[in-house]
Amino acid sequence: MNYIKNPPQTDWQQLAERPVFNYDELVDTVQNVINAVNLEGDVALKRFTKQFDKVALDDFEVSAEEIAEASAQVSEELKTAIGVAQSNIAAFHKAQNRSEDFVETMTGVSCWRKSVAIDKVGLYIPGGTAPLFSSILMLGIPANIAGCKEIVLCSPPNEQGMIHPAILYTADLVGITKIFKVGGSQAIAAMALGTESIPSVYKIFGPGNQYVTCAKVLVQQRGIAIDMPAGPSEVLVIADKTGNPAFVAADLLSQAEHGADSQVVLLSDSNSFIEKTLEAIKEQVEALPRKTIALRALGNSKAILLESLDACMAFSNLYAPEHLIIASDFAEALTEQIQNAGSVFLGNYSCESAGDYASGTNHTLPTNGFARNYSGVSLDSFVKKISFQKISREGIQNIGKSIEVMAEAEELIGHKNAVTIRLKSLNDV
Amino acid sequence: MNYIKNPPQTDWQQLAERPVFNYDELVDTVQNVINAVNLEGDVALKRFTKQFDKVALDDFEVSAEEIAEASAQVSEELKTAIGVAQSNIAAFHKAQNRSEDFVETMTGVSCWRKSVAIDKVGLYIPGGTAPLFSSILMLGIPANIAGCKEIVLCSPPNEQGMIHPAILYTADLVGITKIFKVGGSQAIAAMALGTESIPSVYKIFGPGNQYVTCAKVLVQQRGIAIDMPAGPSEVLVIADKTGNPAFVAADLLSQAEHGADSQVVLLSDSNSFIEKTLEAIKEQVEALPRKTIALRALGNSKAILLESLDACMAFSNLYAPEHLIIASDFAEALTEQIQNAGSVFLGNYSCESAGDYASGTNHTLPTNGFARNYSGVSLDSFVKKISFQKISREGIQNIGKSIEVMAEAEELIGHKNAVTIRLKSLNDV
């Protein structure tokens, strides 16, 4: 980690910048995939699956037998852990389901909103050696609570044409019935456009590599909503002398092991705290199976000494981290100052891993500074909020004149007439 | 209007389609504007303002004197009407500000969410002969309730270098302090990138022509959020024999007068109702100042006879209208069936104009089928919901094992260690 002591505030903007990733190079490649899936459907999917995933598939859909077999392969210990996470995530997301009041804005003029599930949603889960079943919990559980009628999941097959048992087990557990062995940008294209086997959906969620992200951005132009634009994962830790350097080191490493492009930032008002933490990182990194990745991520990472916790909060708000850990006994006193962050972890025992897996909060969060203008995934992400109004005879008499005057001032006489004709009919009675 | 009687369900998809607008032709033009604003700042804004708005401006910011003068030019009658709308819109949007519960998902594991305003937002209000001050109410009022610190408004000047007094009056009324005389795609570029005079913002809202919409889509790629992709305005009316043909005709015309590309759809289970409504349209359209526009919109519009109100609801859900009017005494009984709509108007006295101006609901709504996957603008649009968690010593002991097991199964040992090191420290005590 680069250690920067007391940088002048004029340097903060630059220190808060992320590496810029340019999608332009990928656009042509990904657009070609999308166009091919649009034209050829399953034929294109088969070709891309052979090309990219090195396996020839006749049928993309995972069968009931495969799911039953998968369940038998997942250890009881892991099933219990997944069950705990499922219960906590369900509890937290159910609590987000709050009905709103009817508001009678004037006598006879009632307005309200109602949450209605997005009918059809698609979840993308990346492949690779490690099965990211936790993302299925984070997306499938709220989709189910929202009441989405069709929940489609795509994940790439391995060279044996299989999906990892933990993924199939978890998908089945949270009620996903349509699981397809398709990955990469072709999976995004398939869920956006529909093919013979894969139904089209209205909104696509889930993590993925640069090709997947690029495809999600491109299908937006065809009217498909996406969860959010995704970049490399990030953590920013604010710690003071009441923090624990070994804990903070472990938290920074847990982010660094994600990928060489992971963003890891440590802020403190204490030079000795930072030095102890850097020492602890050096020690702990040795034991990590993903040590090489973690070391590359740390090479681009920063520890910054600032004059006070308030200054740390100000820098954090400028940076707008995906994850913000406040490793201090005074964490709660600082929460009022938080303007921009995806998910916040307060105190010495709230590690990011808890939110990544099991505490109940969602781990699909805005990266790359998007915490300034986007929320993480929640129950809200799976519904539309439809507004309703009911105006009575008395109501239109109360509000009519105001509408007429405003419509006339905007020179929209048809808008005015829609009121006038109603008022007139009531006066004629 | 084209009158289609009892189309087979196989034709519905095609009947529900909108004209496709291709932005590709605009992209180069708009991208050049964005690049110029990025490179040259105010110099580019001045050049484009001279070119497109036919006026040479030295200074873009509206002065306090201009606002005071504008207020003097707005009639008391219009001020009163705007005041009624302001009060209703504020009441409805304040009611959306609901705090959520703390959820203790396990003993010692507390999770909650908090709404925090997006710091800096930009509102775009189109120019033209009629001043669209109602959109300022719909965007400025929730921005203020949310607590956005900086609210910037851009609107094009006329050839005298002025903005319509009703726009300035309304902007001032709802507490917008930074108003700039800049329009078109250059205004969107300025709010996205910032110039010497115009501050950059994190999210841009507001209606506009195709160039403005294209610019909003393009600045998204630079990390700026937008309210939603916008298309031509739409209304779908479902009516039965208990509806009033003259009222429905007036509602359809109020949508048709928006623009030649407006989408107007009438569904009914009654042939005689549709025939009476078509007659009423013929009569009423004659009196409209925007008759030519309305007639062009009606030329592309459809009245469809279906076998039942249930069938009408099914078609409406397929179409996913921006505005849905249910002109029937039985409107409320149908609401449970509504899956896709932006804003719904129930019964014979709930005209769309009410929601456009004054009843309290927002008029910035998803068009072009986006009601399937997007909500309209609300208080939610101006905040991020940040998740928080606080885990106690007891909490990490309750949840720790599950996290360790899941992290290990995902082969993320750094994630596991962040828990293990904490559990170990507690056991060592």
Image (spheres, coloured by chain):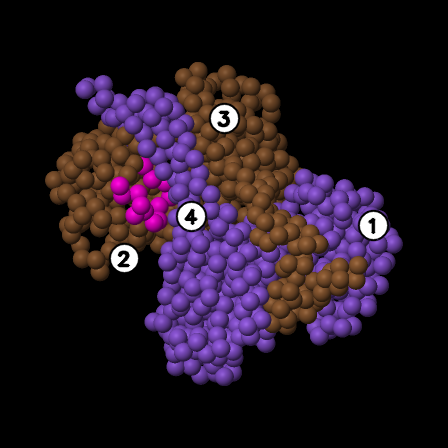
Chain colours: A purple, B brown
Q: CA distance from mark 4 to mark 3?
A: 29 Å
Along the line of sight, the residue nearer the viewer: B279 or B399? B399
Left or right placement of residue A110 versus residue B89 in this view: left
What secondary structure is found at the residue carrying circle 4?
strand
**Residue at image mark 3:** B170
**Is circle 4 on the same chain as circle 2?**
no
Q: Quadrant of residue A56?
A: bottom left
Pointers 3 and 1 in contact (CB under 8 A)?
A: no
Q: Which residue in the rendered view is the most extreme toward the right?
A: A272
Q: CA distance from mark 1 to mark 2?
A: 64 Å
User: Where is B233 relative to A356, above or below?
Assistant: above
Range shown magenta? B333-345
Number of the label disc, if any, that sits on residue A241: 1
- Mark 1 residue crowding within 10 angstroms, few (<14) / some (14–19) / many (20+): some
Residue type beneath disc 2 = Gln
Magenta span has A375?
A: no
**Is circle 4 on the same chain as circle 1?**
yes
**Residue at image mark 2:** B13
Residue A81 showing in the rendered view: yes
- Mark 4 residue crowding within 10 angstroms, few (<14) / some (14–19) / many (20+): many
Q: CA distance from mark 2 to mark 3?
A: 42 Å
Along the line of sight, the residue nearer the viewer: A404 or B407? B407
Q: Quadrant of the N terminus of chain A?
A: bottom right
Number of the label disc, if any, that sits on residue A384: 4
